[in-house]
Image: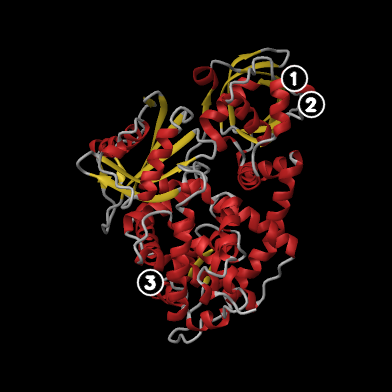
Amino acid sequence: MSSIDNYFTELQEDINNESAKSYVNKNQAFSYIVSNYLVEGEVLISPNICSFKSMRDGICIDGYELSDEMNTLHVFISDFRDENQPQVISKEEVMNLINQAEMFVYTAITGQLHSLSINSEKHPEVYDLARTIRDNHSTIRHASIHVMTNCISALEENPMQDEIERTQTTYHIWDLKKLYDFNIEGKQIDELHIKLNEQFNESLRLIKAPVENDIYECYVGYVSGTLLAKAYEYYGNRLMERNVRSYLQARGKINRGIIATAKNDPTMFMAYNNGLTTIAEEVIFSKQDESGFVEINELLGWQIVNGGQTTASLYRAYVSKEDLSELFVQIKLNVIKDKNRKDELISKISEYANSQNKISISDLRSNDAYQAELERLSYTINVPNTSEPVTKWFYERTRGQYNVEVNRHGVTAAKKRAYQKEFPKKQLITKTEAAKYIMSWEQLPHIVSKGAEANFLEFCNKVREEKVKPNEKYFRHMIAKGILFRETDKLVQSLGYKGYKANLVTYSIASLSVLKKGSIDFDKIWNQQGIGQDLQEEMEFIISNVWKHITNPPEKGANVTQYCKKEKCWELLQNKLAKPTLIPHLREEE
């Protein structure tokens, strides 16, 4: 069996496990898994899984992401095939999937989707998304359509960029081979290749620093505010190095002082602003002088490691029609030559260049000991009432660690099965899942709603500030919170709520925490490996009230997914929970 065949088998197992764990069909489970890969690959930030299909109208989507700035839309459509070996998806089949996703974008932008097959009661999340796209179509400058498939695509190259109702549209095919290259070969899933002149009618004019070594080259100079804003408009947060992006996602992007300077005193921006520190893996020159002056026409793997807030704020000024023609920003560009040291160099440049981001990096480092201790505990703590064999929960602190351990211990088929029995896949918990479970219980559902990366960063901050040191009780209670979360997820699915599942679950857990934080027995949940009928019935009441709250934002027409990311949404729900008339039998006695 080839390596890609082995990977296909492992992927199918992951899909089956995710389907059983989240109580969704396999196509939805596949969409969830691949969208998480795209988050790790820095293509997406906070994807939402929701399915809508109209055969009559030729429309289908399986998920989406709409940026907070309402300037970038991602739509994905999945083709999952439940087979025993890899299949080939033809060019015609790929293009048919693209056409269905394109039709969704077109009918949403033009406002036609509401007059077709969509029903606001049956598909509230998709209906809400379509309305938001229609109302904000003038600000959506870039749309990306992603085809996800567990087949090998006969169409090897992504289709050429196009336009849908004057919105630039790019196309991406994530097939089995690309997923294998990312997960097994460690290749970057989708490297940024920016063609400055072609895309933005401007190049970078810099001076090469007289630094000679085999590790990096450094160029310094300035970049126009217009070029920076246009690049951010097109690529959004993908321009930001991962830790910068997570920081901005969690803490907010816009600096009003930067916007004020751009508006009132643009020629002084160079004097007032510290500028940008950026990295790239490769540059292509259109001009090189012996004096060191260069013109850079193309950038591969370009990312901002310092100056993310400056970039996002200048974009906000740009879309507000401020004139940036006389505004320039200092820039330092480090081009990495030693690819073997890429991750190390990026980490150190990020740490030393950005005082704000330095906090997030130290947070992540301080979490190394925390994560390692949770991993150690997972190998030592047995699940109650299990035998032949006694089972354990597997704590996965690095992506793919579970499969690595299965293969490491499974030198024979029998040993592999034995290890999988001791650590069944349904008892796998990742570090981002753990952060989601704990942050929900700590009454921070608006942070959880911002996506796995932003939530994990805030969780790291919390662990550092509170000096959390895991022990056996902490581990058992963390797993119990995970069981509570998963059971609530299952309950939401079984009760037939249509859409916003991720938001509904985290807000329901946080609401239970407000109402009964002191009386939930996590030791009992751990011992039973379940929440019991009484708590399940209580959660039903809570879910009902949370649904009414999140689907009725105070601002008429507001997008529910975006509303759930705001602290105001949680504050208003807490005010409702404080009223004695709301589910009074659930409230703890004073």
Q: Which percent across, then down, holds residue 67?
A: 51, 39
Q: Left or right: where does residue 472 sit relative to residue 422?
A: right
Q: Left or right: where does residue 226 sit relative to residue 149?
A: right
277 vs 499: above or below: above
The one nearer the camera, 295 or 339, is 295
Q: Which percent across, then down, holds residue 447?
A: 59, 54
Secondary structure found at label 1 = loop
Secondary structure found at label 2 = helix
Q: What label sits on residue 74 in the rendered view?
A: none
449 vs 415: above or below: above
Whether residue 59 is visible? yes
Structural distance between the alpha carbons of marks 1 and 3: 70 Å
Residue at image mark 3 = 413
Mark in front: 1 vs 2 = 1
Q: Which percent across, then down, holds residue 434?
A: 56, 64
Q: Earlier in the sequence, mark 1 or mark 3?
A: 1
Mark 1 near mark 2, Cβ–Cβ under 8 Å? yes
The total number of labels drawn is 3
Which residue is at 43% across, 75% downward? 537
Query: Label 2 is placed on what type of residue?
Result: Tyr
Which residue is at 37% across, 54% downward? 30
561 vs 549: above or below: above
| Name of the residue lying farthest toward the left | 56
Quadrant containing the C terminus is bottom right
Residue at image mark 2 = 272
Structural distance between the alpha carbons of marks 3 and 2: 64 Å
Q: What label sits on residue 265 in the rendered view?
A: 1
Query: Label 1 is placed on what type of residue?
Result: Asp
Quarter of image, res 418: bottom left
Quadrant containing the N terminus is bottom left
The one nearer the camera, 468 or 530, is 530
Mark 3 near mark 2, Cβ–Cβ under 8 Å? no
